[in-house]
Image (cartoon, rainbow, N blue to C red):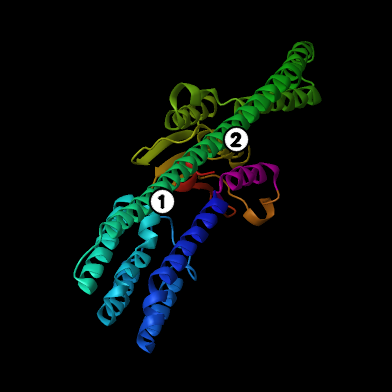
Amino acid sequence: MESWERSRRRWQHAFFVSWLVLTSAGPVIEGGRVLPVVLVAGLAAWYAVWFVLRTPQPGDVPLPYVLGGGLLWLGLFAVDSSFLVVGLSVLAPYCMDAVRVGLVAVVSCAGGWLWHRYHLTGSIAWTEVVISALIAISAGAAVGYFHSVAQQSAERKRLIDELQAAQEARAAAEREAGVAAERQRLARDIHDSLTQGFASVVMLLEAAQATLPDNKHLTQALRVTRENLAESRRVVGALRPGDLDECGLPEALRRLSGRLSDETGVEAHTVITGTLRPLEAHVQAELLRVAQEAVANARRHAAADQVTLTLSYMEDLVVLDVHDDGGGFDPERAASGHGLSIMRERMEQLGGTLLVESAPGAGATVVAGVPVAVLSGAR
């Protein structure tokens, strides 16, 4: 499409030059004066400034060009009325894109040429009328053809842009579907292997503990196995955030904090601020997984009394922060931890950011922000 536009511009330049030479060569040669030559050269240079040295969009005919070109044409017309039809050169860019303007210019120039002949000779021959009409019809047909080709090109460009956008959307949807399918597969594999295995080990250890209730090592093994069973279930839940399918991100966060309170006794709650806006499914999933990871870290390591999840809908981004009042940690030493690295990677893949604010004994806050460009679907 761009090559066609370049070709169209070349034909426009050829039309301008040929018409300018055709309509000005005779009066310039016959008159033998310097001023018409200067004005014709000025008109050619003025056109080159606006349409050769710069690259206007189709249909973009700047008003300064029209005013400047019109003044130069009026100067030529004042010197010699034979330069009347040069006006079509000034309107050449319009003739390529605006069929009505082109037709008016063609008819005006044909009528102006007849008026000029009458002004010189005092009469107009029928042959001159016929020739003028034939030229006007031919030029009008050319203008109409150029305009129809330009419209067809614009329509094709629109269709190609729509097709490309649809293909990109389909590819993005297929990628997301592929990612979702792979996560579902991983979730099933983990559930059917590790989770089930941990559950079986827990049952066996519980049976063993019933016969050896005071065995310290057996008790520790049972505790560690239960923790790993809970972790494997958390991973499966993270891979398959079913809460989103049922209720959306705000309610999923409320359920997450509710489960934390029910299972641990920690005072946990969710706060939603700002005006809710629709989020793409993959954005909701990534934010929920960050929240799940942050809550799991607080549950395992923080020994917190309170955990607060806050989802803030702002003008230019959506922010999720998870705060606990636990023991805190040194963010620099923990930066290489697997959980924080995964959360940071999730946000970077979305074009967002992840910040961790904490200090020993001062609690911890994990802040995830996603810009509006991602939320609106720009990938």
Residue 344 on image: x %, y %: 62, 47
Mark 1 is on which residue type?
Ala
Left or right position of 338 against 162 = right
Residue 142: image tag: 1
Element type at mark 2: helix
Q: Residue at x 29, y 60 (%)?
A: 128
Q: Is residue 3 visible?
A: yes
Question: Distance between the Cα atoms at labels 2 and 1?
Answer: 73 Å
- The residue range painted magenta reads 337-353
Crowd class of label 2 (few under 14; some 14 to 19; many from 20; radius 10 Å): some
Tell me which label, 2 or 1, sits earlier in the chain: 1
Element type at mark 1: helix
Q: Which residue occupies the foreground of this view, 347 or 112?
A: 112
Residue 133 on image: x %, y %: 30, 53
* Residue 2 vertical position relative to residue 184 in the rendered view, above or below: below
Q: Which residue occupies the foreground of this view, 114 or 352?
A: 114
